[in-house]
Amino acid sequence: MTDSNTESLISLREVSKVFKTDKGDVTALENVSLDIARGEIFGIIGMSGAGKSTLVRTMNYLEVPTGGEVKVLGKILGSLSRKELNDLRHKTAMIFQHFNLLMQKTVIDNVCFPLIISGVSGSEARKLAMELLGLVGLADRSGAYPAQLSGGQKQRVAIARALATNPEILLCDEATSALDPQSTSAVLDILREINKTMGITIVVITHQMSVVKEICTRVAIMDHGRIMETGPVLEVFMKPCTSVGRHIIFDGFSLPPLDTDWRIRVVIEGDRALKPAIASLIQEVGPVSILYADVQNTVVGSAGQVILELPEDEDLRKAVFGYLRAQGHYFEVKGGHVYSD
């Protein structure tokens, strides 16, 4: 949830979606409640089939929920007329994994398309389209056709087209999944700049943890149509509190398992990450082995994590735990038991 003093631009309450198929009902969303604040970049992550794309499509009613309430830009979508819903969709633009460009039209004609169908004159549409292509770094490719562009360039055209209606919200459904790392970085840079300079709220649907860490301030983890946990990116990634979150995140990090009573995972946050925390532990308490160590960098900050192997000495184990508690470090042991200040 967002802070009570922060405006929620998107608010979902107990949203469910059931698809009827020949083989029976399929529940895609189950009692999802979520708030996304104005101006933030919010990530939704989960494995394939978790319900991420269905969820984001309820935010502009491309998927009408079976139950619950969706409120966007202060309006309850279920109460809107078709015209009112179409008007709202102009303010909630969407970009997709496979670009959805018109292959027979040039780059500039693709960007002009939503403007023309909205009644903007041809000359004004082309002027605005060129400005948007300049924003995404493709003004020099305005006369090219999509087949002549790389995947990253196609996605940048899709972003320019999405911005043509002057939206307040940009919904990104696996927008970087088909791109190579360099193209992904370029697209994320553009999205970050759009958020910063234009104040557009961005919702990022992805299965790529690297994308969430690079661009998002908050994140929700989904599994089987449900929100399992949500919070600031660094908090969720370093201290997942559900088995699903731990599976998704720790498998992504390739961490050694905490499969004995003598292994612990320690999180070192903030200014403490800059200090020799483990060296001080060894000096003050006794010898330990470092099996794994890394630093996770996100757009909102960094934190370190270390997996230690302790000698099989119960007194030393208790001393290590006591030292870590005294220093205010979060740590966890076999079975997911967590200790924090």
Image (cartoon, grey):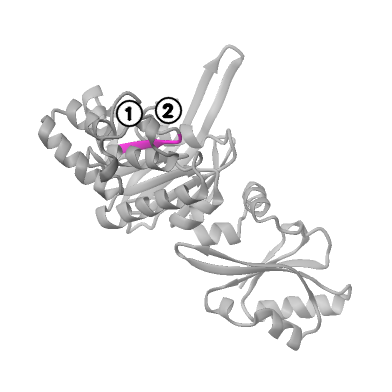
- Relative placement, left or right, of 312 versus 295 is right
Q: Secondary structure at mark 2?
A: loop
Q: Is residue 262 magenta?
A: no
- Residue 78, numbered circle: 1
Question: What is the magenta range?
Answer: 92-97
Which label belongs to residue 155?
Answer: none
Is residue 147 visible to the viewer in this orientation of the structure?
yes
User: Relative to residue 296, is residue 163 depicted above or below?
Assistant: above
- The residue depicted at 25 percent of the width and 28 percent of the height is 86
What amino acid is at disc 2? Answer: Pro
Q: Are marks 2 and 1 in contact (CB under 8 Å)?
A: yes
Left or right, 251 with respect to 35, comes to right
**Residue shown at 47%/57% (left/top)?**
214
| Residue 216 visible | no
Magenta span dominant secondary structure: strand
Which amino acid is tagged 1? Gly
**Figure quadrant of residue 149:** top left
Q: Is 334 left or right of 104, judged from the image as shown?
A: right
Mark 1 Cα-neighbour bin, 10 Å: few <14, some 14–19, many ≥20:
some
Residue to which mark 2 is pinned = 65
Query: At 28% across and 37% down in the image, what residue appears?
Result: 161
* Chain-order first, disc 2 or disc 1: 2
